[in-house]
Structure formats: C-alpha cells, structure tokens
C-alpha cells in the first residue's frame, strides 16, 4: 500500500493548523496592544506665549541707534526731558512713549529723504529707573521706586502719612508725562463724599505735593 499521499496530507494539515494558531496569536497580541496603548491622543496645539508688554521709552533713557552701512549715523542717543532725541541729518525725533521698534520706523521714514533704503535698529542701552516722589508734609518724603502699580493712596501710605498741619484737602499730583496737575481732597476721597475725587494710579515721574 502506498502511504505517501497520507503523509503529505498529514503534513499539509499540520502546517495549516500551525498557520491558524500563529494567526490567532497575532490577532490576540494586536488586541492586547490596542487595549494597553489605546487610541492615539489628539495633537494639542501649543498655547501661544503671552504677549510681552512693550517697553515705552522715557526721558533719561539711553538708546543705541544703528543704521546699516552708515557708521556716521550709528551712535548713542539720550532721551531728553522733553522726550525728544537728536538724530544727524533729520534733527529732533519724538521718542518718549514709543517702543524702540516704533522709534526705529519713525527714524527710517525721515532718513529715507537722505539715505537710500535706510535700515534702522534702535535698542535700549540703559533705562531710567521708574519712580515717583512724595514731598511736603508727610512723615517720609522722598523718591520711591515704581516697581508695581501704585495708587495715590498707596503712595501716601508708603510715605508714612501726613504730619501735623498738613492741608489734606488740597494735595497736588504733578504729572510728568503730560504736565497736568491734579488737586485731590484726601478726606473726601477716603469718605467717598466727592464723586470727582479719584484714587489715581501713579505713573513714572509723578510727584505728590502735600502743602
């Protein structure tokens, strides 16, 4: 009897079972990995960084003016008390209250009358320390750093309050930025009797005068 076909059939059947077992194992492993790993996480867009507050140029600041390929125009600028800087060829330019980028653009526009396609960069070399002043009849008159938002009442508290005979109904706030002078009735402000009285926030260079 020829048994060769039986051996071939048996061998083929065995290989088939092996393939089926391997297929089940692969499917089971894939299922397990799906459970362990889980669905891919949705990509999260990075949050944009908070917008940086632009530094505003103030009197007393020292700036670096750089004009590409124009060494005679490249120099240090001092912001005068009137907020102006003097630039060769174009004269005085308003700098106070501007950012360095805004000032560079303003200088570029005016230099374009004399220089072909000027490329201007302005940088801050040294900034004036922001401060306010309290003078007159207070316990601790002097200059105080303006390191964080500070109101009129907070400034008086830092100065130790009033001394005897202080005229608290006519405290003056001199605004350096715009030259304005505000008169504040301290008692009415504290009591809330005067709607026009305001606990104003101070700005760099402001001076409180207590007569």
Image (tube, rainbow, N blue to C red):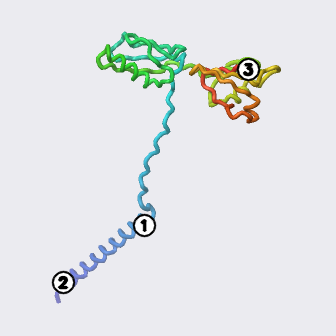
> What is the spatial separation of the Cα atoms under label 1 and label 2, in whole angstroms?
41 Å
The residue at the point 47 percent across, 44 percent down is 47
Q: What is the quadrant of the C terminus in the image?
A: top right
Q: Can you identify the residue that label 3 sits on?
A: 210
Taking depth in this image into account, of 145 and 15 the one nearest to the observer is 145
Disc 2 element: helix
Q: Residues within 10 Å of mark 1 (few under 14, many from 20)?
A: few
> What is the spatial separation of the Cα atoms under label 2 and label 3, in whole angstroms?
118 Å
Q: Residues within 10 Å of mark 2 (few under 14, many from 20)?
A: few
* In this view, the mark in front (2 or 3): 3
For the residues labelled 2 and 3, say whether their Cβ atoms are less than 8 Å apart.
no
Taking depth in this image into account, of 90 and 194 the one nearest to the observer is 194
Q: Can you identify the residue that label 2 sits on?
A: 5
Q: What is the quadrant of the N terminus in the image?
A: bottom left
* In this view, the mark in front (1 or 2): 1
* Mark count: 3
Q: Is residue 3 left or right of residue 168?
A: left
């Amino acid at each position: 009897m020829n048994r060769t076909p039986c051996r071939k059939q048996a061998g083929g059947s065995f290989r088939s079972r092996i393939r089926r077992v391997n297929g089940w194992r692969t499917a089971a492993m894939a299922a397990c990995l799906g459970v362990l790993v889980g669905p891919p996480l949705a990509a999260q867009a990075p949050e944009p960084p908070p917008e940086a507050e632009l530094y505003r140029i103030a009197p007393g600041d020292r700036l670096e003016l750089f004009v590409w390929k124009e060494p005679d125009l490249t120099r240090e600028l001092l912001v005068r008390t009137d907020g102006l800087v003097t630039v060769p060829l174009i004269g005085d330019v308003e700098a106070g209250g501007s950012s360095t980028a805004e000032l560079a653009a303003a200088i570029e526009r005016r230099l374009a009358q004399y220089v072909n396609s000027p490329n201007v960069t302005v940088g801050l070399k040294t900034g004036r320390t922001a401060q306010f002043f309290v003078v007159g009849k207070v316990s601790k008159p002097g200059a105080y750093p303006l390191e964080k938002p500070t109101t009129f009442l907070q400034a008086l508290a830092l100065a130790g309050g009033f001394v005897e005979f202080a005229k608290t109904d006519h405290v003056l706030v001199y605004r350096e930025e715009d030259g304005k002078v505000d008169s504040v009735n301290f008692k009415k402000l504290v009591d809330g009797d005067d709607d026009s009285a305001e606990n104003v926030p101070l700005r760099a260079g402001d001076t409180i005068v207590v007569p």
